[in-house]
Image (cartoon, grey):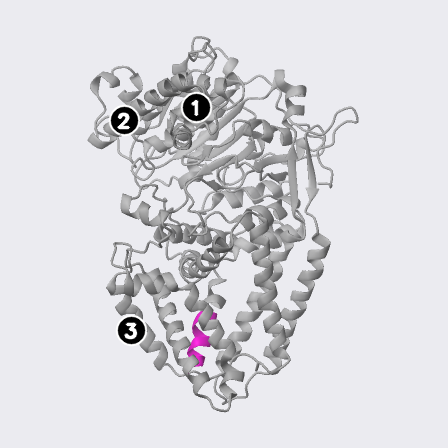
Amino acid sequence: MGKQEGGGEESLPPLFESRRARFIGLYRVFASTILVGVCLIWVYRVTNIPRAGEAGRWAWLGMLMAEFWFGLYWIITQSPRWNVTYRQPFKDRLSHRYEDKLPGVDIFICTADPKMEPPTLVINTVLSVLSYSYPTEKLSVYLSDDGGSEFTFYALLEASRFAKYWIPFCKKFNVEPRSPEAYFALHSDVHDIKYGQEWLEIKKLYEEMKNRIESAVATAEIPVEIKKQHKGFSEWNLKVAKNDHQSIVRIITDGRDINAVDNDGCQLPMMVYMSREKKPQQPHNFKAGALNALLRVSSEISNAPFILLLDCDMYANNADSIREALCFFLDEKYGPEIAYVQHPQGYNNLTKDDIYGNECFVINAVELAGLGGYGTALFCGTGCFHRRECLFGRKYSKDYRGHWNIESQKTIDRSIKELEESAKALISCSYEKGTQWGKEMGLIYGCPVEDIATGLAIQCRGWKSIYYNPERKDFLGVAPNTLDIALIQHKRWSEGLFQIFFSKYCPFIYGHGKIHLGAQMAYCIYLLWAPFSFPTLYYVTIPPLCLLHGIPLFPKVSSLWFLAFAYVFIAKNVYSIVEALRNGSTLKAWWYLQRMWLIRRITSYFFAFFDTIKRQLGLSETEFALTDKVITDDVSKRYEQEIMEFGSASIMYTVLATSALLNFLSLVWGTKRVVMDRHSKALDQLISQVILSGILVLINLPVYQALFIRSDKGHIPSSVMFKSVFLLALACLMPIY
C-alpha cells in the first residue's frame, strides 16, 4: 500500500489515510550504531576464544552462540520498526456516503467452558455488540458454545430479553462502554448520572438478570417454568455431555421478524445460539473448528459480507468500531484488497503498572503497526473484522471490486425451523470429512494459534490486512491475573507459534515471493519465542557459575572491547525505556515487563520448545489450554496490590527459583571476590558478571520474597525451594570447562 492509502476517485475523498511514524530515518541511524556494536561483540568473541585446555573455553563458545543469537534476533526485531505505519479512518465520510446502504455484519463470539468462562461474562460481551451504533437490522450475533451448556443457552435467552431495554438505553444516552458490567462499574454512583431514574431502572433489571443466571449456575438447575417458555431447552437431556452431544442451533431472536423489536419499537438484531456436534474420539479442532462451524451456520442464516470475531471475554468498548472498520473495507481505491482489520488486544483489569506485562504497549504501538505497514497485519484471533469471502479461501485478483452491497439470505422466506434444521447439518462431526475446511477454507487446523497461520495464508493469497490501533481501545478483555495463568497462556502461544515455523506455513517458505521480506522477518519475532529461551537461560546460568569459579567471560573494564558491550547494553535499554514511555507505559511498568520477559523465556518458552519438538516427532498431540477467568477474592486482592501470585509447585517455578538462587549466591560470592582482591585484578575482569548477577537479583526480588518471606497462599511452596536448592548444589559442583 502506498503512503496515502485510501484514495478513491478524484471526486471522492478517501475513507481512511495512512501515515508513517515520525523520525524513522533518525531511528535507522541509531539502530545502525547498535548493529556496529553487536558486530564488534561477535568479533571480540571469535578473536578471543580461550585456547584448548584453558578454563572456560566451552563456556566462552556458548557465550559466542548465545550472543550471536541475541544479535540475530535483535536484527529481526528491526524489520517492523523501520516501517511503522498508523491508520486513521473517517467514519463521518462513511456515513455521508453509505449510510443508506451499509452492509450486514455477522458477529461471532466463542465460549468453551461455563465454569472457566462464566455465562455472565459471556453475555456482557454479547450485550456490548448488540448495542453497537449501527443499524440493528443489519447485525447478527452468533454465540458458539463448545461447552454445550444449557446454562450458557439460558444466559443468552436472558440477555435477549434484557437487550430490549439495554439497546434503547445505550443509544438514547450514548453510553460507553456498552457492556453492562463494565458500564456500571465505571458509573457506580447515580448522583453522577443526569438520567438518574432510567439509570436506576436499567441497573435494577441488569442485577436481577445477573442474579437469576448466577443462581441457576450455582444450584445447577434452571427453573421449570423458564424451561417451558422456550422449546430450545428440549435439546438438553440426560444424554447431553460436554464432549458428547448432537448439533444444536437455536435462533433466539429472528432479525427478519418486524415484530421482534425493543422497547422503542426498533428492530432487534438476529441472535443465534450454536453448539456443534461433539463425539468422543472425534477431532474437533478447538477454536478453529468452532469458528469454521460458525462460518457455515451464519452463511445459511444471515450471510453478511463482513464478520467480527470476538472471544467471550473481549467486550466492545467503542460503539462505532464497526463503522471505523468499514472505512477500510469500503474505501473505493484500496478497500477491495483488504481482507481483514485487526485491533490490538486491550484489557480492563490491568493493575496500575501492569505487573504481569499483559498490555504490551510497545508490541501494540510499534511492532504490530510495523507489520501492518507491510500490509500483513497479524490475525490475532479476537477483535478482528473479516471479509467473508477471504475466510472461504478466495484468492485476490486485481479486478475484484468487493461484493458487499447485496441483499443477504435473511430476505429469503424460510421459517426459523427450516433455517435451524439446515444449519444443524453443517456442524455435524462428519460434515468436514473430504472437504477443504481447515486447509484452504476457513481457519487452518492443526495448530494452537490457528489465527496466525490463517492470517498468513490469506496474505499469501494476495490480500492485504490492516492493523488499526485507535486511541480509545475498541475491545477490552480480561488479562491473566496470576503468574501461573500468564505463563500457561504464553506457553500455549509460543508452542503454537514455533509449530508454525516448523510447518509448511513458515513465512520464509510459504510466504516467499508473496509477502515482503520485512514482513517475513517480523513474523519470526513471535515464531521464534520458544528457541529464544536457550540463549536467555544460558546467560542467566553460565556467567554466574563462572563468576563462582573466578572465570571471566567479558572483556576487562580497561579494554576498548568493553565499550562495545557497554554501549549495546545501555543504548538498547535506554531506547527501550523511551519507546515504552512514548507509547503510554510507565517506568515501573517497563521494569515489570523486563521481569516478565525473563520469566517467560526461561519457563514458558523453554518448555514450549520441548513440547513442540515432541509433537514434531509424533510423541504428543496438540492440546488447547483454556485460560481460567475465575479467581478467588484473596488472589484478586494480591493482584490489585501488585503482589506476584505463585501458589503452586509448578516445574516452571523450580527453574525460576533455581536461577534466582544461583544469581543471588553468585552476586554475594562475586562481590566478596572483587572486594577481597587487593590488586584489583578481579575488579577489572569480573565486574561485568557481578553487575549482570546484580541486575538479575533485582529482577528476581519477588521470587526471593515468595521463597523466604511471604506466608500467604501465593508464596512458593517449600517443595519447590528444596528442589531448587538441590539443583543449585548440583550446578555449583559441576566443573566449568
Residue at 65% over, 65% down:
34
- Image check: 224 left or right of 678? left
Q: Is residue 541 magenta?
A: yes
Q: Residues within 10 Å of mark 3 (few under 14, many from 20)?
A: few
Which of discs 1 and 3 lies nearer the camera? The answer is 1
Task: Name which residue type carries label 3.
Answer: Phe
User: Can you see residue 579?
Assistant: yes
Q: Give the residue at the far right of this rendering.
A: 10
Disc 2 residue crowd, few under 14, some 14–19, many 20+, Cα 10 Å = few
For the residues labelled 2 and 3, say whether their Cβ atoms are less than 8 Å apart. Answer: no
Q: Tell me the quadrant of the picture where the C terminus can be found.
A: bottom left
Give the residues in magenta.
539-550
Vertical placement of residue 352 versus 232, above or below: below
Residue to which mark 1 is pinned: 193
Work out which residue is located at the far front of the displayed protein and give it: 191
Query: Which of the pair 238/734 is nearer the observer?
Result: 734
Residue matched to label 3: 726
Q: Residue placed at 58% from the left, 69% from the top?
A: 68
Under circle 3, the secondary element is helix
Question: Whole-percent x and y of residue 291?
Answer: 45, 34
Percent position of residue 673, x then y:
43, 84
- Tag 2 residue: 211
- Left or right: 503, with 143 as reference point: right
At label 2, the amino acid type is Asn
Query: What amino acid is labelled 1 in the image?
Result: Ile
- State whether the magenta stretch is mostly helix, strand or loop: helix
Indicate which disc, 2 or 3, sits on the residue closer to the N terminus: 2
Q: CA distance from mark 2 to mark 1?
A: 24 Å
